[in-house]
Image (cartoon, coloured by chain):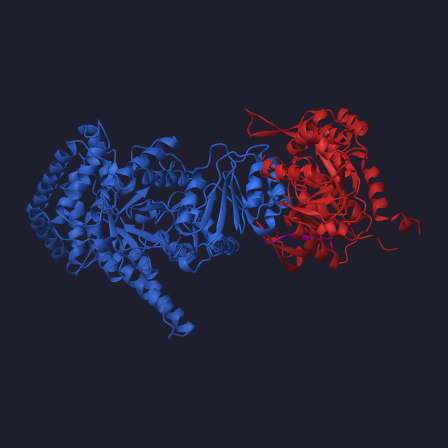
Chain colours: A blue, B red
Amino acid sequence: MDNNTIRKKKVLLIPLDPVHDVALKILNRKLKDRGHKTILLPPDLPLEEIISRLSEINNLDFVLVSRTLGYGVAELLGRFIDMAEAARIRDKAKMVLGGKAITPQLAAELGFDKGFGEKTDFEEIIAYLEDREFLREKEELFRKKISIPSSHTYQYKNNRVKGLLNEITDEIILWSKNKSSPGIERAKLRERMINVSQDDSLADEDKVVKTRALKKEYLSYCDEKIVRFYEKGLLPEKVRKLSSEEIGKLNIYIQQQKKDVNFKKIRHSQSLPLVFVQYGTGCPIMDIAHIKTSEAWGADGVFHFDPSWGARTEGLLEGILSHEEDGSIISWENLAVIKSSLHKETIWTVRAHRGLNTPETAVIAGKLGADLTKIHMVYGSLNGGTDPARLTIDGLEAIKLAAKYNMPFDEPTNEELGGVPAYKSFAGLLIIADLALKLKAQPILKPLFCYSPDVMISGKMDDNYIDFNVAKINSLRSIIDAPIWPGEPIGFMTHSEDRVQSSLTTALHAAIAISLQVDAITIASSDEAYSRGPISLASRIDTLRAVQEAFRFLGKAEIKPTGKAREYEKEITKGIEEALKKVARRGSFVDALYEGLLGSPQDGAYPGRAGRGTVIEG
Amino acid sequence: MEINNKVIGILGTAKNTGKTTTFNFLLEWSNLESIKVGLTSIGYDGEDIDNITGLPKPRIFVQKDNTIATAEQCLFSLEDKIKTIEKTDVHTALGRVVIGKARKEGLVVLAGPNKGIELQVIIQKLKQQKTEIILVDGALNRMIPLIYCDALILTTGASRHTDIDLLVDEIESMSRVFTLPLRKHKQVSNKELKMYQNNIVIIQKKGNPILLKGHSLINQKTFDSLINIIGNQECEEIYIPGIISDTVLKKIINKYYLLFQRKTIIINNPAFLLVGSRYIGYLKDIIDDILSRGIKLKTLYKLPILAVTINPFYPKYSRFGKDSYEAAYIDEEQLYQKMKKEVPFPVINIKGEGSTKLEMIIKKFLNISIRKNA
């Protein structure tokens, strides 16, 4: 509603508190700005005097009382309301109460016409006084799904690096010609099976026949564990199907959770970074509870975390499945039910990145409308346990699928946690990013904000956690204008079993990210490193709240690193160039992976064995 | 035999003084006697946990066909329990007041009209549902809306204060105020006087009444104008339609009593005198002083007090406890005996032997002994 069309109100503001009249002063200013006539009484006047003054004011529309609640205060307010009624003030004006611990129930008990608690948005009070509907600044305004790569050009700023990458990625594409794998074949079959099920021109019987034939072929590319499930209905250990009763209740829960959510705004005056949390408790029901809670507390996006054995198994299961341990099983149905629970503006990432089902996961994610995926062959083969050749070919296919389904993908450099130095992991990161750009996909660089083994040994974080993390971001930014999303989660290896400590380090690392205005961050729950089982919702909220405070604290201010940051940045950039030179000189990306040029056993990286020898030639 | 359709309000001196316990007693009794009962509250009652102390509170359990008036938000997810009869235009902080009928027994939360005029509207609507008794639960120490009831039950207890003498003083003061005599008709009738809502009215021995700006006598300015007039005119009565404060009364006693001697101060209703007092316990002494100086005090409306119920419970602030407050009690017998000695109304410990006594009082008030005998 246009401000000019609103009837101007006469409002009397009464700070009944001896001291706490700041909120009323702010409100007074805001009401005046909107053209309302206001009278702000001095604090702590006797009730008789307030009532006297009130009686003398004509055409009063509202009386706003602010008072912090304590024992005995209720009776004081009760007497005030009685006096106002006896003095006929209530005949003309509405009585509104605001303050700490005030709820609508309490306002009703005290006899006020309306009550506002301490955390109320001033705009909500103004909307009430202006008799218009209050549109909470929620999904409409600050919960907007945005495309992370859209503000980046992907232009190189370092031509030496650009040249080396070009050489390396040309070789990868050449190497991949006429190669396939069971993973790629399954992805193609999965895509066809989904297409059949979604083809309205087909009769149901035809669908059954076609799917059966495709499934038979699909199983020829699967491990025994998966074949047993499809042929005999036997689920892997610690996996069970949710009952129809559980699913029914889950759907009711989802519908309830979608009603009237009061979303927290996590950022303050900044537009970046977006905040992501990961879910993957093993059970889709718990996952959805985590997602809905995270959304409400301000998370912009969530991503799906699957069990590690899933990455080492050829083939995917079907059905809504619960897993007794960490990681939620990737199946069409699991992902579909999770997708159905998401708020429309929540950014959803399904990670494909590291195992034998990488392309197939990308197909399912793409078909279900995931916003992002995650692919990284270097990490997946050096620390994720998958054979380098196999993951290179599968990853390449997954990148093509990501481009096809318009899913930007992030590349986590978690090999750094094993001990690989940052510059080496960045060399791998940039190779995959360059490859993606050649395949018309949109890569997102994911350096770590962590206390890595390498910096522990080299002493680069002996003084502070800022310099080296800033150096990493600046180094990448000096090479290419690409989206940067520190992960995964930020503050990795700085967390302890102490929830306060963990929340604080997460928030402090978020502060660096805010100061650097990176595109996104992933945050852990405060018990993530030590939960020894599913993480708790309270801990999940801990870090979302802590990060919200970091945004509030920092605003548009910046964190200033020491001169060391610049030194480290140069070192990293130089290291990246050196590593890329070695890979280029080797003339084979895959061999470079096997031989440790992007992370060696001395660094703590070991080429994976899952899927070794499964690349199909010709 | 028809039962008088009476409205009984429960007025407390503070939170947790036993309003809802008394209310519940009357509710259960009405249901046992098959008296058609209508229920509402001027506050928020029936919640399981106190809004402030976090201590458990008495719930409100209705029987099938009980009529209730409560806010929309209190009926959330009670569709199967309460049938909505009417959504009224009376608004509360929890939405509009709805008139409903219980389809089956169960717990309800009552949050009804928060001011007198609106309570009147709701009472009428409850009466349309052919109720035979209407119970209005009070809130905290609030009293003004309850003046539209036909009779009140006062409740007090340790939650107001742990000093028994203070509790007795307060109820004594309230008794004194509620038993002030009604003004008798004179040349200016009571009916006429009731029309003056926005002015203090000075009734002269001869000539027309003089009107003074303002309806309440709570500030120096109005008091000065009043003194000015009655000092110069021969007046008999002064009618104050709004609040009269204890400060003003004390001024009259100490400084201006000669001016007011042989004159009558008329208040609209007892509650308007009570809300004007910061310390109700002192009011009895103030009234005594006023009367002893030859000044008369009368009211235009009267409201019978049926009984006083007492409650030894209070929430004690526990500094080191897990929760902020814990339940505590004062000497029940002492409270009862002292109260009984000083107060002219039946004193009842609602949780003790007193419940049958309250039954008799209510029966008499509703005039239903005849039905029982018939």
Image coordinates of residue A143 in percent, x first then y, are: 36, 53
Relative to B73, A330 lies left or right: left
Q: Residue extending furthest front?
A: B232
Residue B23 visible from this viewpoint: yes
Give the vertical position of A66 relative to A355 (above or below). Answer: above
Q: Of residues B243 and A560, which is closer to you in this image?
A: B243
Q: Is residue B292 left or right of residue A303?
A: right
Choose between B10 and A273: the one closer to the eye: B10
Q: Position of residue A371 (x, y in %)?
A: 31, 56
Is the residue A411 above or below the residue B317 in the image? below
Residue A324 appearing in the image = no
Q: Is residue A477 above or below residue B284?
A: below
Instruction: Give, as a single range, the part of the protein colored magenta.
Output: B66-72
Query: How many marks overall?
Result: 0
The outermost residue toward the right is B374
Tell me residue B221's x, y (percent).
59, 38
Residue A573 position by quadrant: top left
Please provide percent x and percent y for residue A407.
27, 57
Is A611 included in the stretch rendered in magenta? Answer: no
Residue shown at 75% from the left, 36% from the top: B177
In this orientation, which residue lies closer to the viewer: B242 or B172?
B242
Is A219 displayed left or right of B272 in the figure?
left
Going 19% across and 41% down the picture, which residue do you hit? A473
Q: Which SS type dominates the magenta stretch?
A: strand
Residue found 61% across the figure and 51% down from its top: A91
Residue at position x 15%, y 31% from top? Answer: A564
In this picture, residue B43 sits left or right of residue B63: left
Q: Quadrant of the N terminus of chain B?
A: bottom right
